[in-house]
Amino acid sequence: MKKFLSLVLALVMTMSLVTVSASAKDFSDDGSITYKEAVDVISGIGVVDGYSGGDFKPTEVLTRGAAAKIICNLILGPTTASYLSADTAPFKDVPVTNVFAGYITYCSQQGIINGYADGTFRPTATLSGNAFMKMLLGALGYDSAIEGYTGANWTVAVIKQAAGIGLDDGNDEFVGSKAVTREEAALYAFNMLQATMVEYDAKTSVDINGATVTIAGDKAKEVAQGSYDNNMHKPNLQFAERYFDKLDKTETTDDFARPATKWTFKGDKIGTYADAADVTYTSNVKLGDIYSDLDMSEKDKNAEVYYNGVEADDVAVSKGNTVKVSSSSANNKLVADGSTVEVFYDEDNNDVTICIIDTYVGTISSKEEKVSDPYVVVNSESLVTKKDASTSVSISGSKARFETNTDNFEEDDVVLFTYSQSADEIKSVVKAESVEGTLDKYTLGKNLTLADTEYKYSKNIAFSFGSETSMTTKSDYVIYLDTNGMVIYVDEQEFDASQYAYVLYTQSSNSRFGKDQVQLVMSDGSVKTVDTDDDYTSLEGTIVYYRADDKGEYALRQAANVHKNGNPTITTTADASIATNGVLSGGANTFEMKNTRAAITTKTGTTVYGNSETVFVVAESDARGKTDYSVYKGIKNAPTIMSDDPTTSPTVETKAVEMVYTTSGSSDVVTFAFIDATGAYVTNGKRDVVFLAAESATKMITDGDNNQYYLYNAVVDDEITTVKVKAAQDAGSVVLAGNDTVNQVVTNADYNNKGLLTSADNISSTDYDRIDVSDHGTGVWKLSGSYSIGLGGTTASASTRYTVASDAKMYYIDTDGVITKIDDVKNISSDSTATYIGLLDMTDGDIAYLFIQEVDNGKQEGAGSSGVVLSGISASYSSGTVTVTLTGTNAGQVYPVTISLVNGGTLVKLTTANVTGAATTTRATISAALSAGSTYMVTCGDQSFVLGV
């Protein structure tokens, strides 16, 4: 034994220059640690540490091996203990390679721990509270044999002694038979640091009939202070004073003026921890009740009161006193429901100290992780005041920062925080618990009932929407609770855009129809007239949340943060100007929204922003006054809307655009917008690659709304489709409307609200390098190699070789303009007469797009080649019959009329009928079974008509 202790002393001297960093560690699971002071001190001196992931895992059970390590760290210090090792296995199940072998060996040799009768130690087994207490008692100097820690009833003696010296202080639910957790081990070790060490007089043991009996020195006595510093400020020598002489405990007050203990190690502060209050209240309390609860026998006529750490008015704590801590005569308005009132009683001096601590609510506005001391920034939602209860305190700048493990928080989290006015800083921040539900009722300034449960208001309650009176019953809210279960913050339940609607018209039960109704424009563009549970005429012209019950009756609530550009008002249906002014009037004539940028100018000097989640419902009216509502999600997918038409010179007269919209909180980001764009410039622009197949071009089509356009088979990005090309293109457009001889590839196409392509640009050289027959001549050649193709030349070997990107978009266009997708370059056949358009990626020069056009030199081109000339054509369909009207006909001339199905990117011919003409106008019927919901093309000569069924 002496040899082993000499080794330990040598290790201590060798490592005396090695320091262990101190200060309270911020573990990622700090919020779940019950014994915060104990864990901070024990981890601060290096006895117990956290895990590599930054957590402490307070409720994880302690193993016997880990317990041995704690004991060694306590007795030897963590640095010296880390050098312990075992030359031979201390127990048969603890080889020298076991991570705890050195610790187990030391504790066994010191008589602090024992193994089992079978020669094992069982290092991975859990450790009971009794067993751990026995280890701690051994480290304090208690002798197991003398104290009776052996035999069948050893636990009784251990618990009696441990409880007698306070090793279980702080855990009122200690059960010695249960496995001890990591934080419980920290608590008991923390208590041991402050426990007094013991020793025995010289003792003599004799053997009587085979039994060892101690006949002298059988009573433990406390070790005298000696030359050790009295850092624990108690009589005689405590464990920490012998083994952690740089650990200092000082009685002080914290920043809330509560009696507290300050711990430092090697001069570095670990933390200051308030004492447990003798009594605690969560509302205003009578001074006589405090007197009784403290079991006082003498009054304290000048009990000190502190509010958030600042001294307030003294009060008299006396028997039967009905005056409260906060009254009109003293500390007025400082205490209310939700306030924490902690009372501390110094019996020796009959001194009562009352500390009022307010809890406030805030949100995390940001967090800073990349600094030596990470912190969160709290935006206070509560009104923080000084002790006069009226002068506000600004929680901003550095005062809004709270150093903590930022992993525990996310931006916009709702948190509870405390603030010390004496220190002028936030002292604690925790996430608030929330409850969601429908508001049943509320009593102003007192309470609310949510989902059939009543909640009191906390003193510093705040509402995200400004005022309590803005709440409406039958609406959904999220409430956040303080630590006492009282409401401290009320927020509207978060809605997605599908739960918004615009209120177009309303009527009350006093109307001629005798019922409450509203007409809503829903977020999908549909219009609904619904019955409501109340009169909502005040909500006409605004955006609402809605909820329908099982009977289809709607409850509405005005959405949060609704804004308007100008003073949009509802235009009545009888107003003849609805076709030009739309459903709203009174907006802004400086409106500008472009889908190429996020900024939206709602009116002069006002800019808001759309993002990928913004939902736009856009209203437009046709010449007959019919209003259509189109829905777009994301600013990039929304139309460009401008008060002035930029494509005409000079610009057309300015048209007002009305916009009613919601924003996200107090930000300028739009979540939902209702826009009346009637009469304004509306176009939908995207940087798509658009290919128009010339051979598929129809003659000019005039539809029922007098829109004139040409229909093309097309590719838009990677989709084979059809595109309606407006006959009169906007100024600056490169599209040749009606061109049926040359294929066109364009980009940045704009579409109006009728779906007609109104303008487009040439392919930008910054996006692609275009190649066609003007570069290499006709001819497309299949070459060897997985991703190679030859363009131009009379033979494959004479062609120009190109690499085709593995994800290239390739298409084959036949002589009728029918487009087929090419899935693999291997499927391309050599054709010396084929023409092509290729787009090369500017990064690597590979072909990204390739359009191959079949050429038939014998084909007769032109829809008018038959000699049929008409001035117009129209058609209708009913019950298997197509009625065709041809204008500009000659009597007796035969007119072939063809009916085709518009199917994706192709026209599928169904039937052709010869119609004998009459003078000027000819009306004929053609039998054809057409499908509802489909689109058909009726053509004759150079005229075409789009027929929707």
Image: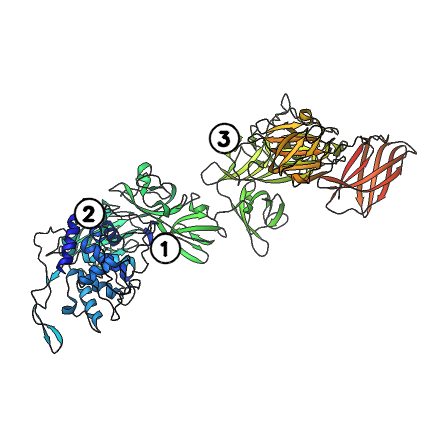
State how far apart marks 2 and 3 are (Cα).
58 Å
**Relative to 756, does residue 272 appear above or below in the rendering?**
below
Q: What residue type is labelled 3?
A: Thr
Q: Check residue 288 in the rendering and tell me which mark sits there, or answer none.
A: none
In the rendering, at what x and y percent does residue 444 appear? 41, 50
Per the image, the residue denoted by label 2 is 265
State how far apart marks 1 and 3 are (Cα).
42 Å
Residue nearest the observer in this picture, 764 or 608: 764
Please name the residue shown 42% across and 51% down the image: 479
Q: What residue type is labelled 2?
A: Phe
**Relative to 75, does residue 946 appear above or below in the rendering?**
above
In the rendering, at what x and y percent does residue 949 appear? 75, 44
Per the image, the residue denoted by label 3 is 606
Per the image, the residue denoted by label 1 is 485
Please state which of the two labelled residues, at mark 2 or mark 3, is closer to the viewer. Answer: 2
Residue nearest the observer in this picture, 782 or 890: 782
Disc 3 on helix, strand or loop? strand
